[in-house]
Image: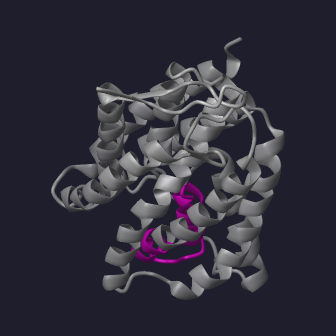
Amino acid sequence: MQVRFPADTFTSPPMTFDLSLALALIALGVSSGFLAGLLGIGGGMVMVPFITAIMSGQGVDADTAIKMALATSMAAIVFTSVSSVRAHHQRGAVRWDLVRVMTVGIVIGAAIASLGIFNVLKGRSLALLFAAFVGFSATQLFLDKKPKPGRTLPAALGLVGAGTVVGMVSGLVAAGGAFMSIPFMTWCNVPVIQAVATSAALGFPVALANVMGYTASGFGLPGLPPYSFGYIWLPALAVIASCSVLTAPWGASAAHRLPVARLKRVFALVLYMLAAYMLYRGLAP
């Protein structure tokens, strides 16, 4: 069975939502949600390469496909982060005092990224940036490197600055910010459990602020596929988010039974391959 979206012949390419596409998005939502819960990583690192490939296969041009993959992945993180935050909050591990202050910087950084830099950069440049970030993150996972505690938390202005960096980088690579916020907090002598929980709570404003920017910067642009909301492709968001929300708690539960340190190294190899694909997308003619 195929559902053909009503294409606007002046602004958007024809797209077909069939059973195979639906199954691919379901599999992507299930796997990204489970891995996010199991390893504490942002699902964007998994989703972006696959959504890019799916949209390119549907006839969307390369630059637009990459930008929409980044935006749609970040939109999905809005939903998956909610269940994660609730679980950590119930255990009393979230430093809400840090969340309140850093969120100010996150909103500033997200605006710079999603309303400014994201609009100016070509999709291929964003693909190269994404590949570099995922390669760095994979190395951190593979080596399981943790910064040595070095100091106490900075004053409010320093926390706002840290939040700005997290919000801006996250907006350019569709990450929840954990690979930056957790090392920063542990370096400032925040206990690891609190750092992980607080980073999960920061993931919601990171995602929400950037999604608002993606929507505004892409609204009304020509060449976007049907059922787009700015740079966000709503059919993919609906399927992926509904599946990942269900499987993220399964991954969190499995984390207490499986050898997570070993799984991180295996997953790092997968991330290297995904980074290589996005590097290819960025360099391909």
Relative vertical location of residue 91 with respect to residue 138 in this rendering, above or below: below
Across and down, in percent, residue 178 comes to 52, 59
In the shown orientation, is residue 155 left or right of residue 14?
right
Quarter of the image holding residue 255? Answer: bottom left
Instruction: Identify the residue at the far top of this view.
Output: 285
Is residue 254 something that shows in the picture?
Answer: yes
Q: Quadrant of the C terminus?
A: top right
Tell me the residue at 58%/27% (across/down).
278
Relative vertical location of residue 262 with respect to residue 111 in this rendering, above or below: above
In the shown orientation, is residue 203 left or right of residue 156?
left
Relative vertical location of residue 120 with respect to residue 245 in this rendering, above or below: above
Across and down, in percent, residue 265 comes to 36, 39
Q: Nearer the viewer, residue 226 or 182?
A: 226
Tell me the residue at 74%/35% (across/down).
222
Question: Which contiguous range is marked in magenta?
Answer: 176-198
Prevailing SS of the magenta stretch: helix
Tell me the residue at 61%/84% (across/down).
100
Across and down, in percent, residue 139 comes to 51, 39
In the shown orientation, is residue 271 left or right of residue 1?
right
In the shown orientation, is residue 97 left or right of residue 119?
left
Is residue 272 something that shows in the picture?
Answer: no
Across and down, in percent, residue 104 comes to 71, 77
Q: Was residue 184 drawn as part of the magenta stretch in this picture?
A: yes
Tell me the residue at 44%/68% (across/down).
196
